[in-house]
Image (cartoon, helix red, strand yellow):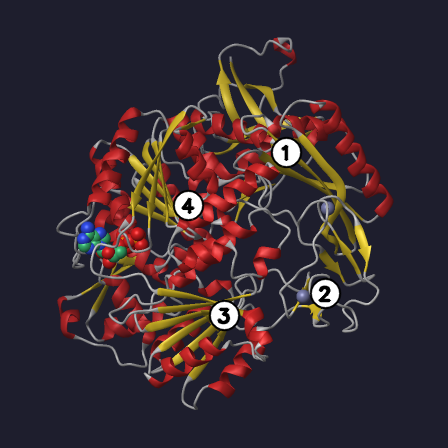
């Protein structure tokens, strides 16, 4: 008799863990690790996932008491190693085992079963039934001397993407809105050929599409060679070793990934590549396609559910050996990866914000250990965690190595950065959102017929009071972090210790600044709309102003359309929120302005400075990508802040030194781990009681252990959301502590709490 250990997918923590079932002879061949099954539980049948199989009956129950599985619902989605990683995730992130297993399942698979008639077998409900578009598009020889009209930006985008090699039409549509009709128009003109590759799963079918592979650089830079050598060594060590490719934007990191993957494939192993969702463009996909053709599967949230399933299935069948995708592609069923690559490793979007609240970088490190492959992290502004581990040389049993690529291959130069002190501007009589230097630079840029990008940081203000004259934001005397301003009740609060101060007068202009006595104190905020209006007054007619923010990009494809407008304009200014900082690559942009660089610095978040620095470096990198040199103007009330000085001097050390000293002093990551447990519910009293009980349970469990600290409970910064009261408990632990295990146990010890919801966030990024 065979036995299966099954994780039941039911929404209760009480039945967490794996349960043993017998696999009757008829089911045994299919009831393998990774299979989805139907298992009896107290008179009903529930969906579950097999995480282990055995020939031995379980020790805990008498063999005749072991219930048999009812049915096998789906073929295996993961193997033993993935099951091992899922079990680790459940403990590491203090989440139910079923939550940790779910990311490994086929895209679109639901936890629901249906059947046509009583007595029929059950079927899993799935989203992924849509028709799959197998059409591929590629350039014909006629494309070489054909140019699209100027007002056909989509055709141009499609041609540029296909210049790297043929792509699936579905993929193009996912990254370029309206691509399908552009492809049709181009096909009519004979410059693009479309063919069906239904047989993509078999032996590499013949194709008539010309594959104009992207040119390989004749010679790798010294940095690229060093990075490749380190990656090879890590892959051959088969120990889960990590290589951090620390290279400025445009230093050739992607080229390193491509070569490293080629070597992995040559050794008979595959590769997983994660890029931030926003970087998953036709150009990126095109570069991988042109090098590896049909061996690439792309997992993209903008593909249809059917497409996504199909790509995932190609990986499972072993046809696709290179997987390119966003965060969740980490869980693709690639059997033997030699490499896992995470591009833009510092991106906060690699942290999942719902259960399981994992960080892709850390899960990838665990996965690389389990599979004996290398982990490659790439960034121009690596996370402090990654840098710290490289300085240590090892983390969790694997070696961490940093390779620096400080230069771009050609003659491209970094832009000149100027920091403008806005308090000084204000004292000099400046009341505009633009400082004198920025106004001048904008007018010059327009008169030269060039383009500018203006970034307005939308995160952070409104929640704070700020003095317009000196930039002072009231701080907590005992925690030295910015006080948040609570409009309801007009009080200031410290999110860390919970103290509050009444500010009857705020934001009435009669109140004054605690620092300089100025009366210009208020909940500070400018909108993109206001910037747009002031710009139109400043600039001559004929200069287009394009606004890109949450309002103007709500419609599907709006983001791309605005970028196309900006691209097609003769002279234009693009005004936008943080969303414009990344991925924008227009050689005509010679000026980048940051309206308010410091609003994020005041967020009650210990990573605020790191995020500010990373964002400023990113946005500065948008200037001067072409022939003409670029200029960057950063407006701030905090010109002396190390993040500003570092960006101005292109010197990361200036920032790191100051930031690491502060983190060490306050015992924040990377010198500790930080967990955040948020509790919310309709009743304030119940929420207070539960959060107190939780804090007590954690305090009882960690006692006086060195390196542990329990903060709170306090109200969350967002103290009320959708009629729920929100409180939280923050826990700091030593870097090598089992934080998930401790918090998971504390949560379980509380039992079920009526009317209270709870989220446990280990290595939290969002503390609000
Ligand atoms: P990153 O990923 O670091 O931003 P890319 O790999 O995209 O950098 O490279 C930037 C540009 O430089 C690309 O156009 C790429 O083709 C080119 N490039 C990369 N490596 C080299 C090299 N060794 N010699 C010349 N050009 C290179
Ligand atoms: Zn405080
Ligand atoms: Zn002041």
SS state under label 4: loop
Who comes first in sequence, dot 2 or dot 3? 2
- Comparing labels 2 and 1, the label whose residue is closer to the camera: 2
CA–CA distance in space, label 4 to label 2: 37 Å
Q: Which residue is mark 2?
A: 513
Who comes first in sequence, dot 4 or dot 1? 4
Q: Which residue is mark 3?
A: 576
Q: Residue 728 or 654: which is nearer the viewer?
A: 654
Determine if residue 445 is in view.
yes
SS state under label 1: strand
**Residue pictured at 29% horizontal, 51% vertical:** 198
Disc sitting over residue 732 in the figure:
1
- Comparing labels 3 and 4, the label whose residue is closer to the camera: 4
Of all residues shown, which one is farthest toward the right?
Answer: 685
Ligand 3 within 8 Å of disc 2? The answer is yes
Who comes first in sequence, dot 3 or dot 4? 4
Q: Residue 733 or 65: which is nearer the viewer?
A: 733
Ligand 1 within 8 Å of disc 3? The answer is no
Who comes first in sequence, dot 2 or dot 1? 2
SS state under label 3: strand
Who comes first in sequence, dot 3 or dot 1? 3
- Comparing labels 2 and 3, the label whose residue is closer to the camera: 2
Ligand 2 within 8 Å of disc 1? The answer is no
Q: Is residue 324 above or below residue 386?
A: below
């Amino acid at each position: 008799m065979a036995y299966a250990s099954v994780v039941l997918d039911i929404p209760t923590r009480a039945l967490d863990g794996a349960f043993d079932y017998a696999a009757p002879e008829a089911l045994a061949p299919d009831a393998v690790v990774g299979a989805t099954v139907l298992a009896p539980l107290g008179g009903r049948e529930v969906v579950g996932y097999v995480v282990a199989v055995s020939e031995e009956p379980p020790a805990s129950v008498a063999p005749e008491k072991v219930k048999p599985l009812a049915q096998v619902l789906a073929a295996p989605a993961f193997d033993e190693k993935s099951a091992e990683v899922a079990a680790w995730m459940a403990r590491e992130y203090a989440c139910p085992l079923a939550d940790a297993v779910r990311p490994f399942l086929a895209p679109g698979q639901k936890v629901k079963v249906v059947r046509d008639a009583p007595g029929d077998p059950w079927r899993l409900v799935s989203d992924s039934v849509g028709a799959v578009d197998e059409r591929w598009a590629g350039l014909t020889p006629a494309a070489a001397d054909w140019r699209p009209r100027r007002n056909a930006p989509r055709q141009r985008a499609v041609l540029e993407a296909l210049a790297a090699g043929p792509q699936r039409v579905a993929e193009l549509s996912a990254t370029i809105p309206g691509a399908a009709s552009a492809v049709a128009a181009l096909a009519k003109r004979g410059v693009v050929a479309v063919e069906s590759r239904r047989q993509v799963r078999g032996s590499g079918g013949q194709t008539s599409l010309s594959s104009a592979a992207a040119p390989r650089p004749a010679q790798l830079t010294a940095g690229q060679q060093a990075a490749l050598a380190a990656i090879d060594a890590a892959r051959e060590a088969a120990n889960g070793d990590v290589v951090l490719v620390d290279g400025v934007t445009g230093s050739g990191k992607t080229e390193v990934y491509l070569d490293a993957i080629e070597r992995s494939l040559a050794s008979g192993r595959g590769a997983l590549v994660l890029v931030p969702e926003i970087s998953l463009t036709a150009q990126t996909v095109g570069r991988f396609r042109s090098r590896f053709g049909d061996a690439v599967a792309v997992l993209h949230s903008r593909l249809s559910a059917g497409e996504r399933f199909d790509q995932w299935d190609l990986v499972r069948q072993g046809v696709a050996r290179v997987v390119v995708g966003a965060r969740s592609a980490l869980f693709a069923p690639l059997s033997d990866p030699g490499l896992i690559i995470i591009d833009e490793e510092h991106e906060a979007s690699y942290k999942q914000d719902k259960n399981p609240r994992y960080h892709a970088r850390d899960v990838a490190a665990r996965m690389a250990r389990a599979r004996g492959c290398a982990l490659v992290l790439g960034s121009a502004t690596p996370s402090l965690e990654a840098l710290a581990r490289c300085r240590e040389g090892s983390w969790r049993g694997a070696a961490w190595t940093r390779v620096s690529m400080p230069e771009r291959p050609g003659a491209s130069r970094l832009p000149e950065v100027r920091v403008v002190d806005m308090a000084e501007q204000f004292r000099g009589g400046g009341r505009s959102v633009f400082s004198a230097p920025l106004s001048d630079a904008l007018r010059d840029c327009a008169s030269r017929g060039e383009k500018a990008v203006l970034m307005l940081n939308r995160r952070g203000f409104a929640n704070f009071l700020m003095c317009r004259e000196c930039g002072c934001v009231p701080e907590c005397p005992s925690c030295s972090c910015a006080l948040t301003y609570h409009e309801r009740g007009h009080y200031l609060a410290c999110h860390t210790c919970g103290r509050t101060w009444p500010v009857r007068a705020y934001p009435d202009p009669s109140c004054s600044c605690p620092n300089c006595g100025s009366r210009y104190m208020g909940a500070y905020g400018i909108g993109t709309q206001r910037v747009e209006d002031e710009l139109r007054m400043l600039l001559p007619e004929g200069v287009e102003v394009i606004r890109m923010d949450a309002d103007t990009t709500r419609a599907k494809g709006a983001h791309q359309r605005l970028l196309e407008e900006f691209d097609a304009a003769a002279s234009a200014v693009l005004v936008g929120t943080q969303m414009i900082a990344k991925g924008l690559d227009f050689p005509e942009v010679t000026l980048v302005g940051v309206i308010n660089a410091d609003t994020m610095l005041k967020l009650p978040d210990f990573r605020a400075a790191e995020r500010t620095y990373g964002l400023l470096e990113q946005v500065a990198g948008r200037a001067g990508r072409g022939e003409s040199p670029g200029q960057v103007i950063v407006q701030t009330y905090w010109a002396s802040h190390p993040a500003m000085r570092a960006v101005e001097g292109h010197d990361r050390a200036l920032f790191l030194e100051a930031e690491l000293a502060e983190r060490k002093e306050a015992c924040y990551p990377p010198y500790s781990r930080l967990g955040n447990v948020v509790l919310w519910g309709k009743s304030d009293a119940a929420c207070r009681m539960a959060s107190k009980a939780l804090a007590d349970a954690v305090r009882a469990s960690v006692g006086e252990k060195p390196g542990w600290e329990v903060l709170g409970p306090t109200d969350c910064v967002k103290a009320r959301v959708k009629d729920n009261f929100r409180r939280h408990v923050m826990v700091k632990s030593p870097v090598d502590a089992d934080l998930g295990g401790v918090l998971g146990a504390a949560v379980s010890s509380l039992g079920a709490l009526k009317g209270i919801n709870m989220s446990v966030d280990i290595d939290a990024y969002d503390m609000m």
